[in-house]
Protein backbone atom coordinates (compact mmCIF):
# COMPACT_ATOMS: atom_id res chain seq x y z
CA UNK A 1 0.00 0.00 0.00
CA UNK A 2 1.56 3.23 -1.13
CA UNK A 3 -0.27 6.54 -0.66
CA UNK A 4 1.68 9.79 -0.71
CA UNK A 5 0.53 13.01 0.90
CA UNK A 6 2.35 16.12 -0.26
CA UNK A 7 3.75 18.45 2.35
CA UNK A 8 0.80 20.83 1.78
CA UNK A 9 -1.79 18.04 2.19
CA UNK A 10 -0.06 16.65 5.27
CA UNK A 11 0.06 20.11 6.87
CA UNK A 12 -3.62 20.84 6.10
CA UNK A 13 -4.84 17.48 7.44
CA UNK A 14 -2.84 17.93 10.67
CA UNK A 15 -4.26 21.45 10.98
CA UNK A 16 -7.82 20.15 10.51
CA UNK A 17 -7.31 17.30 13.01
CA UNK A 18 -6.07 19.80 15.62
CA UNK A 19 -9.41 21.63 15.30
CA UNK A 20 -11.44 18.44 15.91
CA UNK A 21 -12.58 17.20 19.31
CA UNK A 22 -11.30 13.79 20.30
CA UNK A 23 -8.02 12.03 20.85
CA UNK A 24 -5.88 9.83 18.64
CA UNK A 25 -7.62 10.85 15.41
CA UNK A 26 -6.17 9.75 12.10
CA UNK A 27 -6.98 10.26 8.42
CA UNK A 28 -9.14 7.54 6.87
CA UNK A 29 -9.06 7.41 3.06
CA UNK A 30 -11.45 5.19 1.12
CA UNK A 31 -13.45 4.60 -2.02
CA UNK A 32 -17.22 4.26 -2.38
CA UNK A 33 -19.63 3.88 -5.25
CA UNK A 34 -21.23 6.79 -7.08
CA UNK A 35 -20.18 10.01 -8.71
CA UNK A 36 -20.15 10.58 -12.45
CA UNK A 37 -17.55 7.89 -13.16
CA UNK A 38 -18.68 5.17 -10.75
CA UNK A 39 -16.28 5.37 -7.78
CA UNK A 40 -15.82 8.28 -5.38
CA UNK A 41 -13.02 9.23 -3.02
CA UNK A 42 -13.73 9.64 0.66
CA UNK A 43 -11.57 11.23 3.34
CA UNK A 44 -12.39 11.83 6.97
CA UNK A 45 -11.17 11.49 10.51
CA UNK A 46 -11.54 8.35 12.59
CA UNK A 47 -10.24 6.88 15.82
CA UNK A 48 -11.03 3.19 15.31
CA UNK A 49 -9.11 0.61 13.31
CA UNK A 50 -11.26 -2.11 11.70
CA UNK A 51 -9.98 -5.61 11.00
CA UNK A 52 -8.35 -5.66 7.58
CA UNK A 53 -7.47 -1.95 7.60
CA UNK A 54 -4.03 -0.99 6.35
CA UNK A 55 -2.32 1.72 8.40
CA UNK A 56 0.85 3.67 7.69
CA UNK A 57 2.48 6.91 8.70
CA UNK A 58 3.22 9.86 6.44
CA UNK A 59 5.50 12.48 8.04
CA UNK A 60 3.93 12.04 11.47
CA UNK A 61 0.37 11.63 10.19
CA UNK A 62 -1.37 8.27 10.63
CA UNK A 63 -3.33 7.24 7.52
CA UNK A 64 -5.68 4.25 7.35
CA UNK A 65 -7.28 2.59 4.30
CA UNK A 66 -9.89 -0.18 4.37
CA UNK A 67 -9.06 -3.48 2.68
CA UNK A 68 -11.51 -2.98 -0.23
CA UNK A 69 -10.21 0.49 -1.07
CA UNK A 70 -6.51 -0.35 -0.78
CA UNK A 71 -6.04 -1.81 -4.29
CA UNK A 72 -7.87 1.15 -5.85
CA UNK A 73 -5.74 3.67 -3.97
CA UNK A 74 -2.31 2.08 -4.27
CA UNK A 75 0.07 4.67 -5.72
CA UNK A 76 -2.24 7.65 -5.12
CA UNK A 77 -0.84 11.11 -4.36
CA UNK A 78 -2.99 13.49 -2.31
CA UNK A 79 -2.23 17.19 -2.56
CA UNK A 80 -3.83 20.33 -1.14
CA UNK A 81 -4.15 23.42 -3.32
CA UNK A 82 -5.16 26.88 -2.16
CA UNK A 83 -6.58 29.38 -4.66
CA UNK A 84 -8.82 32.44 -4.80
CA UNK A 85 -11.99 30.31 -4.53
CA UNK A 86 -10.67 28.55 -1.42
CA UNK A 87 -8.78 25.33 -1.08
CA UNK A 88 -9.24 21.69 -1.71
CA UNK A 89 -7.64 18.29 -1.81
CA UNK A 90 -6.59 16.94 -5.19
CA UNK A 91 -6.06 13.23 -5.81
CA UNK A 92 -3.80 11.87 -8.53
CA UNK A 93 -4.64 8.20 -9.02
CA UNK A 94 -2.48 6.19 -11.45
CA UNK A 95 -5.05 3.37 -11.32
CA UNK A 96 -7.83 5.52 -12.81
CA UNK A 97 -8.56 4.97 -16.49
CA UNK A 98 -11.12 7.80 -16.51
CA UNK A 99 -12.24 10.55 -14.15
CA UNK A 100 -15.10 13.00 -14.05
CA UNK A 101 -14.55 16.66 -14.89
CA UNK A 102 -14.28 17.77 -11.27
CA UNK A 103 -11.92 14.93 -10.31
CA UNK A 104 -14.06 13.56 -7.49
CA UNK A 105 -14.92 10.27 -9.13
CA UNK A 106 -13.10 7.72 -11.25
CA UNK A 107 -13.09 4.16 -12.54
CA UNK A 108 -10.32 1.63 -12.96
CA UNK A 109 -9.83 -1.13 -15.51
CA UNK A 110 -10.84 -3.70 -12.86
CA UNK A 111 -13.62 -1.75 -11.12
CA UNK A 112 -16.09 0.56 -12.84
CA UNK A 113 -18.26 1.05 -9.75
CA UNK A 114 -21.82 2.29 -10.14
CA UNK A 115 -22.22 5.84 -11.47
CA UNK A 116 -24.79 8.11 -9.84
CA UNK A 117 -28.00 8.67 -11.77
CA UNK A 118 -27.30 12.40 -11.80
CA UNK A 119 -23.82 13.90 -11.95
CA UNK A 120 -23.17 17.04 -9.86
CA UNK A 121 -19.89 18.14 -11.48
Image: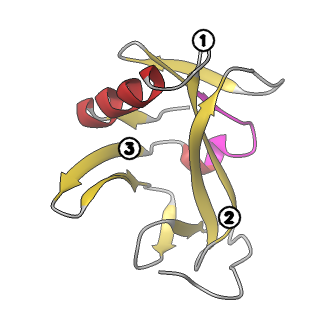
The front one of 114 and 28 is 28
Total marks in image:
3
Residue at screen point 60% across, 62% down: 40
Kindly give the residue lying farthest to the right in the view shown.
Answer: 51
**Viewed as shown, does residue 28 lie left or right of 76?**
right
Residue in the picture at 44% in, 25% down: 19
Q: Earlier in the sequence, mark 3 or mark 1?
A: 1
Q: Nearer the viewer, mark 1 or mark 2?
A: 1
Residue 101, given in percent of the width and then of the height, sits at 40, 79
Nearer to the camera, 48 or 17: 17
As drawn, 63 above or below 65: above
Q: Which residue is mark 3?
A: 78
Q: Is residue 105 left or right of residue 5?
A: right
Label 1–label 2 contact, CB within 8 A: no
The picture places residue 43, in percent across and down from the top left corner, at: 56, 44
Instruction: Report the span colored magenta.
Output: 64-71
Q: Residue at x 58, y 80 (%)?
A: 36
Amino acid sequence: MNITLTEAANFRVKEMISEEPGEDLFLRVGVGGGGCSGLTYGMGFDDKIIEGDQAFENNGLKVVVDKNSAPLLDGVTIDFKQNLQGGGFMIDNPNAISTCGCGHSFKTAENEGEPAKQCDC
